[in-house]
Amino acid sequence: MTRFLPALAALALAALPASAETYTLFIYETPADIALRTDAGTDGAAYWAAYAEFGARLGRDGVARGGAPLIPGETGTGELVLGGYFQIETASRATAEAYAAEAPSSKRGGKTVILEHLPTPGMMAPQ
């Protein structure tokens, strides 16, 4: 029986889900895109629809952990503005980068910055 224990242990470990890392996608937008937030026309509706679809995709894929649009601070003309964030949990940074490339900001002249969360002992929820 004891000679089967290492094989059973290996099978049990293989059945465990891959560990996931938590990342925040910081959404930097152009001032023109920030202005679309208050546009009551079709351009404003398209702006919000793009983010709704992106957020829905993160949810469907099971990686969404949170997020919100932010009220931007003051910036100079032409500077990108931190407009919001999405918190995701993925198996790798490469996967997080693939999601970031699909964010509306990444396709509209803005950028998405990815930061990995640092596990902090004492601040983690009890398991």
Image (cartoon, helix red, strand yellow):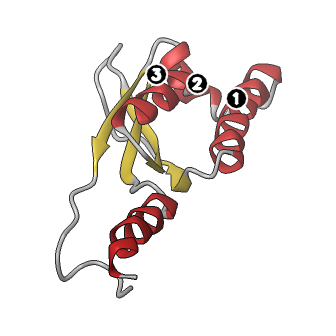
Per the image, the residue denoted by label 3 is 31
- In this rendering, the answer to whether 63 lies above or below 110 is below
- Give the mark, 2 or 3, whose residue is nearer the N terminus: 3
Say what amino acid the circle numbered 3 marks: Pro
Of residue 9 and residue 72, the one placed in the foreground of this image is: 9
Local SS, label 1? helix
| Residue at 66% over, 45% down | 61
Classify the position of the N terminus by image quarter.
Answer: bottom left
**Nearer to us: label 3 or label 1:** 1
Classify the position of the C terminus by image quarter.
Answer: bottom left
Marks 1/2 in contact by CB < 8 Å: the verdict is yes
Residue 90 spot, x, y in % from top left:
45, 46
- In this rendering, the answer to whether 85 lies above or below 97 is below
Which corner quadrant of the image does residue 123 belong to?
Answer: bottom left
Q: How far apart are marks 3 and 1 (CA)?
A: 17 Å
Local SS, label 2? helix
Per the image, the residue denoted by label 1 is 50
